[in-house]
Amino acid sequence: MHAQSPLAVCSTPPAGGVLLGISIAATAPARAGDGAMDRKTGAARWRWLKGIGLALCALLVATGANAAHAGHANESGIRASLDRLAYGWNTPDAEAWAKEYWADGELINVLGAIYITPAEIRDRTAEILVGPFRGSHFDFAIRRIRFIGTNAAVVDTDITVTGFHGLPGISPTKPNELVTRMKHIYERRHGIWRIVASQNTAVAPAPKQP
């Protein structure tokens, strides 16, 4: 008969839902012909293995919990930045929008124009907020946040701008409404999350039925 592996407990997901799936191929000695000394040696070895296994399991669970906590903290910083972008549009405050970009940040807008540095992004945003997007309202939904290492993330958002009446080269997705897919590349520097690159793609209106 074989006893349970010392790390079998690690195969059960902890409270955070992380499945560690680690095991050690060790069994407790249980042969009927073993001498007393062999049984003592085997039992001592088994207790040692079990202690090491439980300690390692506890360490891995703690490490997983810390990593999950760090992930949530990083995500909250990015979400706060996205909220500030929406605030900058709706206020309207082009300066607040541009502050979410690093000094080497880049924005490609729905027309394919490229704006480099927060100053260029600020000036173009200010221009459209008193022009074709005057009085519009910006809303967004986060489709996905995918971290690349610990200091970068790809963020996909779905944007709905209401009060939009048209822009040369861009038609409303629906009457008075423009829907876009905006992708941001966020980078953390000195503990702060800001954007290094954004690209915005307009969703074309549905084709008219013949």
Image: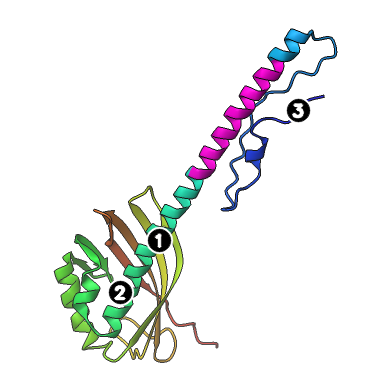
- Label 2 sits on a secondary structure element that is helix
Check disc 3: other Cα within 10 Å, few if <14, some if 14-19, many if 20+. Answer: few
Quadrant hosting residue 128? bottom left
Query: Circles 1 and 2: CB distance less than 8 Å?
Result: no
Between 205 and 61, which is closer to the camera in this rendering? 61
Marks 1/2: CA–CA distance: 14 Å
The amino acid at mark 1 is Glu
Comes first in the chain, label 1 or label 2: 1
Q: Which residue is mark 1?
A: 75
Between 84 and 156, which is closer to the camera in this rendering? 84
Q: Which residue is mark 2?
A: 84
Horizontal side, residue 182 vs residue 20: left or right: left
170 over 105 or under it: above or below: below
The amino acid at mark 3 is Ala
64 over 73 or under it: above or below: above
Between 80 and 104, which is closer to the camera in this rendering? 80
Marks 3/2: CA–CA distance: 57 Å
- Coordinates of residue 35 in the picture (x, y in percent): 79, 7
Instruction: Work out which quarter of the rendered image holds the C terminus and state it.
Output: bottom right
Q: Which of the two discs, 3 and 1, sits closer to the camera?
A: 3
Comes first in the chain, label 3 or label 1: 3
**Is residue 2 highlighted in magenta?**
no
Report the disc number at residue 3. Answer: 3
